Structure formats: C-alpha cells, structure tokens
Amino acid sequence: MFRQLSERFGRPVAMAILTLLGMWLMVMVTLPQLQMIDYSFRPNLLPAQLGGPEDVWTLSNYVTLFNNEIHRAIFFKTLWSSVLVTLLTLVVSYPLAYYLAKVATPRQAALCILLLIIPFWINEILRTYSWFIILAFRGPLNEILLALGLIDRPIRFLSGDGGVMVGMVYAYILFMVFPLYNAIESLDDNQIRAARDLGAGNVRTHWRIVIPHAKPGIATGCIMTFMLAAGSYAVPALLGSPGSRWFTQIIYNWFFEGGNWNQGAAYAFLLLVLCIGFMSLVMKFFKVGLGDIAK
Amino acid sequence: MNSQRLLAFGLRFYIAVFFLYLFLPLLVMAAATFNDSRFPTITPWDGTTLRWFGELAADSGMWQALSNSLLVAVGVLCLAVPIGIATALFLNTVSSRAKPFIYALILSPLLTPGVIIGISTLIFWRQFGVSGGIFLTVLGQATFISAYVMLMVMARLQRFDRTMERAALDLGASQWQMFRRILLPYLKPAILSAAVIAFLQSFENYNTTLFVVGYDTTLTVYIASKVRTGLTPAVNALGLILILVTVVLAIAYEVKRRREQAAVAQSGQAMVLAESQEKA
Amino acid sequence: MDSNVKLDEVVMRFGDFTAIERTSLEIASGEFFSFLGPSGCGKTTILNMISGFLRPSEGQVWIGGEPMAGVPVNRRPTAMIFQNLALFPLMTVFENIEFGLEVRGVDKRKRREVSERLLALVALEGSGSKLVTELSGGQKQRIAIARALAVEPRVLLLDEPLSALDLKLRQHMRAELKAIQRKTGITFIYITHDQGEALTMSDRVAVMSAGRIQQVADPMTLYRSPRTGFVASFVGENNRLEVKVIDREGERVRLDGGALGSLMGRAGDDVVLANGQAAALYIRPEHLRPLGDGDSGPRLETTIEAVHFEGAWLMLETRLEASGEKLRVQLGSELAKRAAQALEPGRQIDFGFDPEEAVVLPDDGSPMVDEATGEVLEVAPGGNAKVGGEHVPSA
C-alpha cells in the first residue's frame, strides 16, 4: 500500500496519508468501539478494584436488560417506532422524490431542491424545537383545532410517542428524499413511457418499473433513517415525556445519572447491534452492497 | 386522461402541502420570537416586541456556548478535512485485497448512531485520564465528519483524469509538485464544499456532543437545555438568527455552485466558437 | 547534443503476458521515427519505456548515449504529447507552457520569454492569457506541443496525438508537426495506428505486431518491399495469393499458383525461399492492369463483382475464376476510361501484373488483416493450413 502511494505522491505525502488514515481508523474508529464492547462485558467496579479478581468478563450487564421489564419494553418500543418512522418517512418521501426526478421541469426541480436543502442545513434541535412550539398544550395546533370545533379540550400531544414520531419524520425526511431522488432520477424516462404504452396503470408502473429501479435508494434511505431514529436523543428528549422514553435516554441515564458506564456500554452495544442488524436485513432484502450506499 | 390529470393535480397539491409542512414550523418559531409573551408561542399574541433579542445578547452563557461551538468547529475542520482528503486519496490509489475491509471500516462511522460514537470516544479516553470537554468533542465529531469529507472529495477525485499526473511528471515535476500544483487545485472546490459542510455538521451536532462535552457547553447543547429548563422566547431569537445565517450561507453556497457550472458551460461555448472559426 | 535513442535487448512482461518481445533498435539523433501497428501491438508500451513510465523487465533504454535505468520520468530528457493532450484545464495557456520551467525553478521573466517564443512557433501569438478550455481542438494540439517543447527535450514522444481531430485538421497538423520537427531538430518518436500519418511524416517507420517489430525501414521501402506478410497486408492494401515456389533465379521467383497456373514474382529482401516451399504472392491493387486478348504473361481471369468510383481512380472488387478468391483492383482514370465498357458487375476481365512489383514472401503464419478495416483478425495457425487440397494441384 505504501509503495503504491509513494509512487504516486512521493514519500512524504504517502507517509502523511497513511498516518492520518491509520490514526483515524485506529484511534478514533476501531479502538474506541472495541473498548466500548470490552467495557460492556465487565462489571462496574471501583477504581481500586480494577485489575483485581472481580475484573473479569461477564454477561451480567446484558442480563440486567433482560431482567428489567421496563428497559426491555423501551428497547422494543424504540425498535418498532423506528421501523414505523422509517416506513412513514418512505411513504411521505416517495411522491416528492418521484415528482422531483420525473415530473418537475429542471427549473422547478432545482428550486425545490434548494428549498429542501435549506431546512437540512438548519440545526436538528431547532427544527425539533419548532414542533415543540406547535404541539404545545396551549400551542397553535390545539388553538386551531379548538377554533374549528374539532376538539373540545386541548390535547397533550407532547406526552405520547405520537409527537416524537412526527418530529422524527420531520427531522430525518431529507435523508430519505435525496437517496430516493438520486435513484429515481437515473431511471430512463423511456422505460416509464414504455410501461404506460403497454397499458400498465400508474400503480403497476411504479410497482414494476420505478420502485425496482430505486431499490438502492430505498435501501440507503431506510438504513439512514432507521439509524438516525433509533439513535435519536434530541427528538424524544424535546418532544417526549417521561412516559415515552427512548432507548438512547436510558443509555444516557446509565452514564450520567446511574454512573454505571459498563451498563451503559452494554446498552449502547445492543443499540449498535440493532442498527447493524437492520442494515444487514435491508441490504439482503434489497440485494444491495455497501458500495451502493456510499453514493 | 381525466384521471391522469387528477393524479397530476393531486401530486402538485401534495408537493405544496409538503413544503408547507417543511417550512411552517420554522415560520411559527420565527414568529414566536416577536411575541411579547413569557412562554414561546404565537397563541395568544400578546403584542409585538424585540426585547427577546436584547435578553439573548445579555445572556453570557449563550456567548460562552457560541465561542465553544466555534472552537470545536475549527478543531473539527483541522482534523476532518486532512483525514477526509487523505482517505479519499488512499482509496483512489491503493488496490489491495484488504481494501473492501478497510472501505467498510471507513464507512462505518456514517452508519453508526451518533450517540454510540460519543460513548465509545468517552470510554476510550477515560483510560488516559481525559474526560469530557472540548477536546473530546472535537475528536468525537471528527470521527464521523471525516467520512463525510471523504465522500465529497472522493466524488470529485473519481472524475480526475490521471493523464494530468503523468503529464506533470513527464514535464519534470516531482510527485510533490504534481500534488501541489495539479491535484490539490483540482480538488479545491470539493475541499471547500466539504469544509463548509463539516463546519455546519460540527456546529449543529447534538447526539455525539451530548456524551463527550462534559461540563462545557456548545450552542446546540445550550439550546436543548434551555428548551427543557427555563424556556423563554430568547431561544427563538437565537434560533431565528441561526436560521437566517444558515439560509444566507446555503443560498450563497448554491449560487456560487451554479455560477461555477455556468462558467464551465460558458468556456465550453467559447471552445465551440473557436472550433467553428477554425473550420471557417 | 546527442539525442539518439537506443533500445538494447528490451523485454516487457506484465505477469505472464509478454507485451514486448526482445527488441533492439536504434533511433538516430534528429530523426522522425514512427511506431506503426494496430492497437494492442505494444507500441504504447515502448513509448512508456522510453519516457520512463514503465521499467523494462529486461534490457535497457539509452538516450543520448546515457543509460536510463534508474532515471525516473521527471529526470528524463524526453517530453510526451499525450493522446488526450492532458493540458491542465485550470491553468492559462501561459501557465501550461511554463509549467515545466516553473517546476525547474526558472524565474518568471525567463519563463515568459520562452512561452512567447513557443507561442510564435506554433502560430498562436497573443492567446497566452486564455484558459485552455476556451481553445479549439487544433489550438489545444499546438499548445500541447509548445508545452512539451518548453522543457527543451532531446526527444519528443507523441502518442497518437492527432486521433481526436477531424480529418482535415489532422492532415493539416501532419504538415505542421513535420515542419516543427525540422525547425527544432529534436528527435520525434511518433506512435500511430494510422499508416497515412506514419508514411507521410516519418524518416523511418517500425511496423509492430503482437509485441514484435516486424520491419524497420523508410516509408518507401516499407511499401515497396515488405519483409513479412503482416507488413505487406497492414501497410497499404495488398492482394494475397497462396502459391508454391518452383524455383528462384536471383530476385525472380517462378511460382506454382495452383489453379491459377504458373506465376512470377520478386523475392522479398533477405527472404529465404526454398524450392517447393509454400509462399504468398502479394500484388497491390494499383499494380494490376487489364489485359487484352493478345497480351502475354501470367493472366488472372476474374469476374467483376462491384465497382466503386473513388474520384481519381476506380476500385474493382473481382473474383478469381480459377480459385474463387477475391482480388481487388485499382484502376487509374486513364486505364479505367480505356476499359470502360467492360467495367460492370458480372463482366469477365483478365488482369496481368509486372512480376517486379509483386513480392513473394514465405508463408510465415502472419496475422491476417481484414481487408476492409485494416484490423488484425488472427494469427493463421501454421501459415498455410487453410489452403489444403484446394490450391495444391492434384497432379
């Protein structure tokens, strides 16, 4: 590897490249993850006990989750809700991505993309916060519904999972729209036209032509959205209530309130396994590789 | 045909609703800044005021958080941009049987939840006696932002015509001179874009930062804590300012990008013109 | 300064594949030398070994009497014109031309003097401040030449630099390149698959096939006296007839043409032809003349299949009645006028040729060249294997 690099860039640059890459992959990416996994298999000990007879590998941190009914429930709720958020986002994004890629004129599409990018550049916390204002007990949404006579009493939107999911769809929608758009855009228009000429209806055209072609985009969007949703801390913290906690919040509590980092590391590792598991499933289901995702 | 038209209309209607959904919350938040109410809302409207900007300016915690955020962002730039460039160059140059594995490793920070990057960074540095703070925030954020930089640099590098390199060497340039004078100038636009994106990513990061920031505070962490405790429309004022700054930045970035594309198209036209004169 | 190039027992292998078979060759100082061959014949590999992008597996390259082993690309006294020109798109014309001087640390004033002078040489004065993306194809071509000349190379290497231009411009640039070479006196090594380019510009041409140099000669000799079947069919057009040697007297060879009867030809230079050996007789289309009833000598009886009017000449596609093989005939307008009434498909016509102009070469199993496209089709196994009983007289 060094030979190829130094033949192209000369020794100093080659050395710099390998140093930077090695430092990043070792010190920032790999070793911390391994350390976290190692941590999750060790008991929470006092500094004096480290290296002592009790400092051995154990599954006890994982057993804790298994035995704690509340944490278990939150883990699974996080899983299902994230899947739901992913599907919702997919459904909401697909028509938009299709419009941008195949219906809009180039000028319209360029304008829409600019409009899409702007909120994308704005802080996730601020975007979530704006929903906090809208969904507040005495906020505009309740006021409008009351004024329209649709409800008699204001609704506590911020106490269940509903608010959290609305906020998540809002926060992560662009991670779905752009991969979908890129994938659909590369579809040859003639294929759609040909399907129409052959008498295929709208639904069938999408189901048989557009969606199969957009598979890598759908996979990428789903993987990113699920990862962001399952790993989200800001949205449930801002839009949820103590009754609708997210798994990330449990992890946070182990670290900064329970003071049990080993336990927290075990939970974090489970979250990582969850995301990797989802990713592998999606990649297998859509038959796409890592290379397709990185586009 | 009629149902087709109905469908097209439905799609357009949907697009309109979608953009309303995208922007309405931001407008509501912006509007609440000017409401003379102790709590950030637009209902009821208690009169228009600018006092929340004044309160924001007087908030020393906010200024401290802002300067921390800028410091972190600069630190992240200094780490992530060189790492991202180096990684792109590596992937573009090296062919080895280990490459798919290395590639997966390089992409992994993009597919790992931010909280986990924060947690693993925090745990890893504990053994060296480093606890949460600005330093770890920089490291944690740079872990995944480097991968974004790599993707953006890579996209341009893949379109590089390597005969340029050969030509430079053939004309007597050393490898370093080739790198300095040919390759880096070619990558410059991508590096600048990547730097802008990296800065923003760092500035607005919450999930990773939350675990590694320790007793320091970045602006995003500050806003989140304000929302949960001691919420006043001063937060909206801050939000509004940040939104305006990002919108201006985003538009400027987009305009610059389009102008560059237009310039390319124009020089192409000049070439066609020169070509046609040659034939005449 | 001596600027000859010597390939000394050079071999180039990539893994199991031998791209260049053992080759020795000397190119003189100030010569315009071309490597001509179909794509994949190894000519670009040779250029890359001279420029230093490739290190030969065996043997050595010498430039100006100095061994080049261990001398990297950027220290060699060569400069290359790339097929896609490889101008630096982000730089102006000046910056492009001056790049080689800049990296050598030449000061700015001196650099500008050189580039102004070179712009004048390639007739592009005043366009130094333009971006190269604003130039036309022909202008880019000239800037690429100026950029290469700026570093005062002893040898200029040109890798099919004209292939991207349209026909008219290409022909114009041929003359210009030749003029520049004469003016500067630099050794030019030119690579092409276009025989027109090689023949018009070069002092000498090396014809290559399958990693081997088939023949090195000046264009006239190459055309008149090909040494191998490959050269005979690749350079210019040739009709190939399968024959057997009866006997030889000096250059004259008497041949048994099978069903075609007895034929005559001139032995190729330095070729060994034993009596009874299988051989090939090459007759160029323009060397065939229609025969009247009274004319003597070898007579090729054909039927016309197609007539193509090419302006200054006519091209006839005919078939030999005796053997069924194709024979292409090119008739100048005078000849065509005389034979006009007989020139239509289906008519029978007899042709003769001057044995002095028909070359006899041993049947060496050279690659077959597609007559229409000039593409190399395959290496015929064992040379005349396909001839079989068809052509051998059954007597």
Image (cartoon, coloured by chain):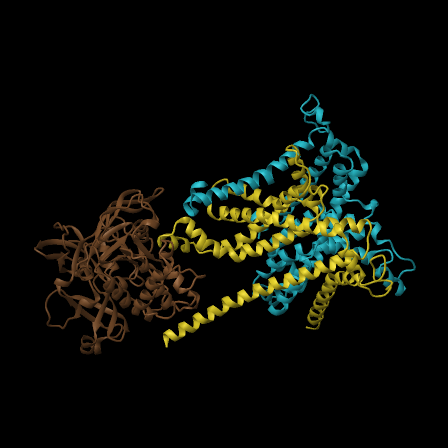
Where residue B106 sits in the image (x, y, percent)? Answer: 57, 44
Q: In the rendered image of this protein, which colour is used for chain B?
A: yellow
Viewer can see residue A289: no
Closer-to-camera residue (C238/C338): C238
- Is residue A59 depicted above or below A204 in this figure? above
Residue found 36% across the figure and 62% down from its top: C109
Chain letter for cyan, please: A
Residue located at (72% from left, 28% from top) = A43
Quadrant hosting residue C172 = bottom left
| Extreme residue in the top direction | A53
Residue A203 rendering spot, x and y as whole percentages: 68, 62
Give whichever of C63, B192 is nearer the camera.
Answer: B192
Comparing C344 with A73, the one in front is A73
Q: Look at the image and tell me in which quarter the N terminus of chain C lies.
A: bottom left
Q: Residue at x 46, y 54 (%)?
A: B183
Is residue B274 visible in the rendered image? The answer is: yes
Q: Is residue A1 left or right of residue C292?
A: right
Q: Position of residue C331 (x, y in %)?
A: 21, 72
Q: Which chain is brown?
A: C
